[in-house]
Amino acid sequence: MGDGATIPCAGPGTPYEPAFGKQSSPTCGHTYTRTSATAPGGRYPVTATSTWDVQWEGAGQSGTLTVTRASSTSLAIGELQVVGAP
C-alpha cells in the first residue's frame, strides 16, 4: 500500500457504494493514517495482485493452472484540517 502495509484478501472485496460513507470495507480495505507528503514524489506506490487457481478438463485430461496478475500505480494521500476561529 506504499505506507508499509500489506493487505491480504481472501476474496474480491466489497464494491463501494455511496451509502457506506466513510465506513471501512467489511471484507478487504486499508485506511491511510499518514499523508504521502514525505514519500518519493509525494506519492505512495501501490500494487494490487490477484492469484487465480484455474481448474480445466478436456480431451480426457485435467489439471490446475495458477494465474497471477499484478497492476501498479501511485497515490497521493493528503489530509484536510479545519481550523475554526474563536
Image: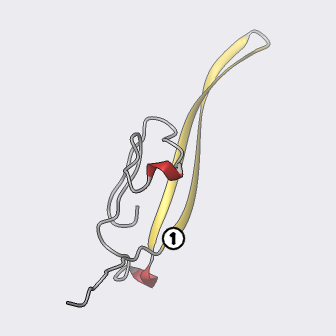
Tally of numbered discs: 1
Residue in front for this viewpoint, 58 or 48: 48
At x 51%, y 70%, the residue is: 74
* Amino acid at the residue labelled 1: Ser
At x 48%, y 35%, the residue is: 11
- From this view, report whether residue 45 is shown above or below residue 14: below
- From this view, report whether residue 20 is shown above or below residue 57: below
Q: Quadrant of the C terminus?
A: bottom left
Q: Which residue in the rendered view is the most extreme toward the front?
A: 86
| Residue 62 place in picture, x, y as percent | 67, 16
| Residue 30 place in picture, x, y as percent | 37, 55
Q: Is residue 29 shown left or right of residue 83?
A: right
At x 36%, y 78%, the residue is: 80
Residue under label 1: 74
| Residue 69 place in picture, x, y as percent | 59, 48
Q: Is residue 11 shown left or right of residue 83?
A: right
Residue in front for this viewpoint, 27 or 84: 84
| Residue 58 place in picture, x, y as percent | 77, 15
At x 39%, y 41%, the residue is: 26
| Dot 1 alpha-carbon crowd within 10 angstroms: few under 14, some 14 to 19, many 20 or more | some
Q: Is residue 10 shown left or right of residue 60?
A: left
- From this view, report whether residue 14 is shown above or below residue 75: above
Q: Which residue in the rendered view is the most extreme toward the bottom?
A: 85
Q: Which residue in the rendered view is the most extreme toward the top?
A: 60
- From this view, report whether residue 79 is shown above or below residue 55: below
Q: Which residue in the rendered view is the most extreme toward the left?
A: 86
Q: Is residue 31 shown left or right of residue 53?
A: left
Judging from the image, what secondary structure is the residue with disc 1 in? strand
